[in-house]
Each structure stands twice: as structure tokens, then as C-alpha cells.
Image (cartoon, helix red, strand yellow):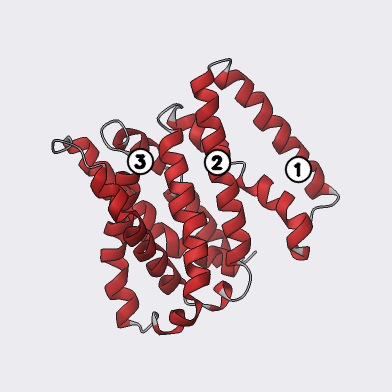
Amino acid sequence: MTRKGWLLFIAISVIWGIPYLFIKIAVRELDPAVVVFARAAIATAVLLPLAASRKMLRPLHRQWLTLLFFSLIHMIGSFLLIGYGEQYVSSSLTSLLLAANPLLVALLAVGFEKRERINGPRLLGLLIGMLGLVVLLGFDVGGNGQQWLGVAFLLLAALGYAISTLLLNRPPLVELPRIGVATAECAITTIVLLPLAVSRLPSRIPDLDVLSSLLVLGLICTALALPTYFARIKQV
């Protein structure tokens, strides 16, 4: 892996290591649909002028169906599932469960992506990772029914992340501008979730820590994170 690849890997590890705490804070007072809508709307406001000024939106119009499908899986579906999951489990357990994403990518790649297929040391690493996940889940969740519901939501979110990762690494998405794809995904999410978010707005203005969490989620964990994540996949 190149130096740029390592830098992107470290950057996205840090950026996407922090959102689960802020999601947990936000869903204390807001419905997850409102949280995801606000996160996507803030990111759209930041990315849209940037993508437009660099003429990164023009190549996207022919792939709008693919972008819609990708957005439904990667952001709308997975982000909502994470929000609902964090209503039942801790932010630390959330990050642990979503760490199953590489394991799921490896499993899905068996049937869909020859370059990612597992064998030898990779297979051993996959088995160790799966065993570790099962052991840690047993300690953290126990027999709480509501927590297991949260676990199910989060594993489905990890599956959505895995599917979208494979989609990003294949035509036509891999051939499109990274910032353009991120902008389109955030804009689509904002439009799709607008009716649901409006119907679930809180009766009062949220506390400052909730509003601050939305800003962090929108600016850092989405507007900055998505182009970094997409660039990492293309690079590595």
C-alpha cells in the first residue's frame, strides 16, 4: 500500500471512529430519521458548492439510478439502522459491531469480487476476527432482548456498508468523481428523508450538546469523511 493509502486509512479510521458517541447523544432527544436528515443536509450544504465549482456533478446524471440505489443502502439504510441501534446499545458496542464490516466484505466477495476473495492467511484472519466478535458480543450484550434488537440493527448496517464498499469498487461508481458521488449521496438522502424528518421533528429546540453533535456529524463525520473514504477505496 502506498504512503497516500496509509494516510487515507489513518484519516478515515480517526474520522469514523468518533461518530458513534455523537449519534448516541443526538438520538437521546431526536428521532434517528431527523439525525440522518440533518447530517446529510449539513454535508450537502458544504459539498455541493465544492463539487459544482470543480464541475464534478456533470458526469453523475447518467448514473442517477445507481447513485440512488447506492444511497439507499449506504447512507439512508445504514445510517438509520445505526441510529435506531444506538437507542438500545452503547456507542462502544456500536463501533465494535460495525468493525464487522471487513469480515462481511470478505464473505460477500466470495461470490461477487474475485480480487477480494479470501484464502490462506486472509481466511485465518477472517476466522479469528469472527471468533473475537462472537466472544466480545457475548460479554457485552448478555441476555438483554432490547440490546439484541440493537445488535441486529447494527449488523444489518454493517452489511449495508459491506455491500456499498463492493459497489464503490466497481464500475460505474469507481469511475465517477469522489466528491461528486459524496455530494449526490448526501443530496439524495436529504431529499428522501425530508418528509419523514419533518413528521418527526421534536416539540422543542434540542439542547446545545445535541445541536453540537449534529454539526460534528454533518461537517466532520460526513462532509469530510465520505470523500476521504471514497478516495481510500479507489487508492487501496
In the image, residue 40 above or below residue 210: below
Name which residue lies at 42% across and 64% down. Answer: 185
The residue located at (78%, 58%) in the rendering is 111
Residue 44, can we see it? yes
Which one is earlier in the sequence, the residue at label 1 or at label 3?
3
Q: Which mark is residue 125?
A: 1
Q: Is residue 11 visible?
A: no
Pointer 1 local density, CA inside 10 Å: few below 14, some 14–19, many at least 20: some
Q: Residue at x 80, y 53 (%)?
A: 118
Tell me the amino acid under the disc marked 2: Leu
The answer to which of marks 2 and 1 sits earlier in the sequence is 2
Per the rendering, the mark at residue 32 is 3
Q: Is residue 105 above or below residue 232?
A: above
Distance between the alpha carbons at the discs numbered 2 and 3? 17 Å
* Image quarter of the N terminus: bottom right
Mark 2, residue position? 98
